[in-house]
Image (cartoon, rainbow, N blue to C red):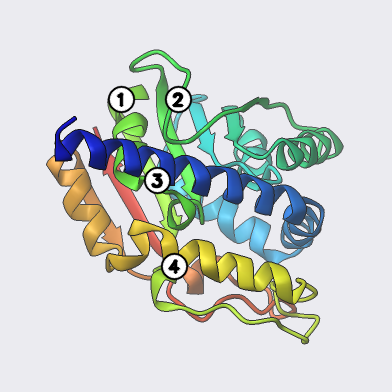
Amino acid sequence: MNNNMQQEIFTYDQDAVLTDLIEAYWDERSRDFSRLRLKELAGPCAAAWRSYLAEKLAAAASLKILDVGTGAGFFAILLGSLGHQVTGIDMSADMLHQAKQNVLAAGCRAEFHKMNAQALDFDDEVFDVVISRNLTWTLPDVMQAYREWQRVLKPGGRLLNFDSDYGLMTFSRKEDQADVHANIRQELVTECNDIKDELRISSHRRPAWDAEFLRSLGMKVTLEEDIAPRVRVDAAMKFDTLPLFGIIASK
């Protein structure tokens, strides 16, 4: 076996271990995370996000949208309320349970599947839009995820990714109940930092890295360096201080 093959096997095994750790972490976080997203949906952030998404989608008709890393169903609810057909995927079964309950309670409709964002079980060119929020910073192989997301987009389809450069940040436990990271056990905070520091994406500076890679796939990319002032508008919630970037890429 040559060195390249050995490195590929090592990388695959390492990513598989990280994937299992990440799935277990978000399973444990699912109920608290769902409560956080429901609080966001109940406040002014929901209207702000709905307005922003409607502007970026500029849709005259219902779109077929893939919500990658749907979590507790935040985007699924907002996009469903705008009349779109949403399919949400997540690798955490417990998160998907929360999403299904939340979408039902909101009176919306969405389809959900347990699936790895880096290995989509969909045919080529089936979605008008692929959307994701605060997911890519958690993935072992963001390049493969982007390849997959581009694959399932229809020609002319759009990728919307919202995230922060968390590789620069060290998470800490928050006591302030208004903070979005309040009440997380110290053990989970430590685990989150340990996982983050193992991920290759943490060594890249974002969103410049993302834009460069997406352009290498032949996509047209627009960057918004910080959309936080537009969507994090609830004074009762304290969000991360890092910029929340927006990537809008067309196939």
Give residue 120's mark: 2
Secondary structure of the residue carrying tag 4 is helix
Mark 3 closeness class: few <14, some 14–19, many ≥20 residues within 10 Å:
many
Q: CA distance from mark 1 to mark 3?
A: 14 Å
Q: Earlier in the sequence, mark 4 or mark 3?
A: 3
Q: Nearer the viewer, residue 238 or 121?
A: 121
Instruction: Give the residue furthest to the top.
Output: 123
- Nearer mark to the viewer, of 4 and 3: 4
| Image position, residue 181 (x, y; %) | 69, 73
- Judging by the rendered image, the residue that carries numbered circle 4 is 197
Q: Earlier in the sequence, mark 4 or mark 2?
A: 2
Secondary structure of the residue carrying tag 3 is strand
Viewed as shown, does residue 105 lie left or right of 46?
right
- Judging by the rendered image, the residue that carries numbered circle 3 is 160
Give residue 113's mark: none
Q: Earlier in the sequence, mark 1 or mark 2?
A: 2
Q: Earlier in the sequence, mark 3 or mark 2?
A: 2
Q: Nearer the viewer, residue 191 or 72?
A: 191
- Nearer mark to the viewer, of 4 and 2: 4
Mark 1 closeness class: few <14, some 14–19, many ≥20 residues within 10 Å:
some
Mark 2 closeness class: few <14, some 14–19, many ≥20 residues within 10 Å:
some
User: Marks 4 and 1: in contact by CB < 8 Å?
Assistant: no
Give the residue type that dot 2 points to. Leu
| Image position, residue 58 (x, y; %) | 41, 40
Instruction: Give the residue furthest to the bottom.
Output: 176
